[in-house]
Amino acid sequence: MSNEIFIGNLNVDYNQDRLTEVFKQCDGFTEMTFPSSVRRPARFAFCTFATAEDAANAAEAMNGEEFDGAAMSVAVRYNEEQRANAQSGRRARRHVAEVGPTSNVMTYSRGLPASVTEEELAQLYATIGITAKEIRIVKSSFRTHVFTEFASAADQQKAIAELHEVEFKGRKFFIEASTSTGKKDNAQ
């Protein structure tokens, strides 16, 4: 196990000094690393601890905690061997979600904070005069996906045309026609 943790789902304008102070309170804190990016600030960081146990305890304690308006995704960072094993497991599970032709009433959205609610999304759709028939939020360890079913193809197209890449909850909202329902099938 690694003595480094990954901290993700950070707002674009998070304060690095404040984030460092938050993690300094965890036992065994050694250092904080902030990747640099030429195009935009990185929305993640790495924190090193004295031992793997300290890292695991910090990850467990801090995962899901709110920082600058977003729930952090915190996990022990994989070493190269662990990463390879995890990727092979993902490949084996790749066909779990129901996938089909592009829907004319369902949309897929990404780029959302983990704290987003169905009510907030319903309010967003209401700002352009449409009502969602069903909103399904699917959260994985580092991403939040939303599948929305609309009453008509016209509502779906209006949502895509008017909401794609607008700012929502401090992030760019991506919405497109869906090829999945967001529900899992029984295949393993």
Image: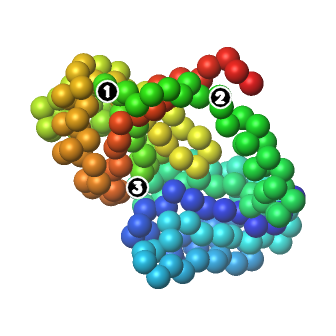
Mark 1 nearby-residue class (10 Å; few <14, some 14–19, many ≥20): some
Question: Which residue does the numbered mark 1 point to in the structure image?
Answer: 104
Question: Which residue does the numbered mark 2 point to in the structure image?
Answer: 96
Mark 2 nearby-residue class (10 Å; few <14, some 14–19, many ≥20): few
Q: Amino acid at mark 1?
A: Asn
Q: Position of residue 35 (x, y in %)?
A: 58, 77
Asked if residue 132 is positioned above or below residue 46 in the image, the reply reads above
Indicate the quadrant containing the N terminus: top left, top right, bottom left or bottom right: bottom right
Asked if residue 118 is positioned above or below residue 55 in the image, the reply reads above
Asked if residue 108 is positioned above or below residue 82 in the image, the reply reads above
- Measured in 3D between alpha carbons, the distance from the residue under mark 2 to the one under mark 1, in whole angstroms, is 22 Å
One can see residue 54 in this view: no
Residue 159, quarter of the rendered image: top left
Q: Position of residue 20 (x, y in %)?
A: 58, 73
Dots 2, 1 in contact, CB < 8 A? no
Q: Amino acid at mark 3?
A: Gly
Secondary structure category for the residue under label 1: loop
Dots 1, 3 in contact, CB < 8 A? no
Q: Position of residue 72 (x, y in %)?
A: 54, 54
Q: Of the two numbered discs 1 and 3 on the same chain, state the one appearing first in sequence.
A: 3
Indicate the quadrant containing the C terminus: top left, top right, bottom left or bottom right: top right
Q: Nearer the viewer, residue 134 or 100?
A: 100
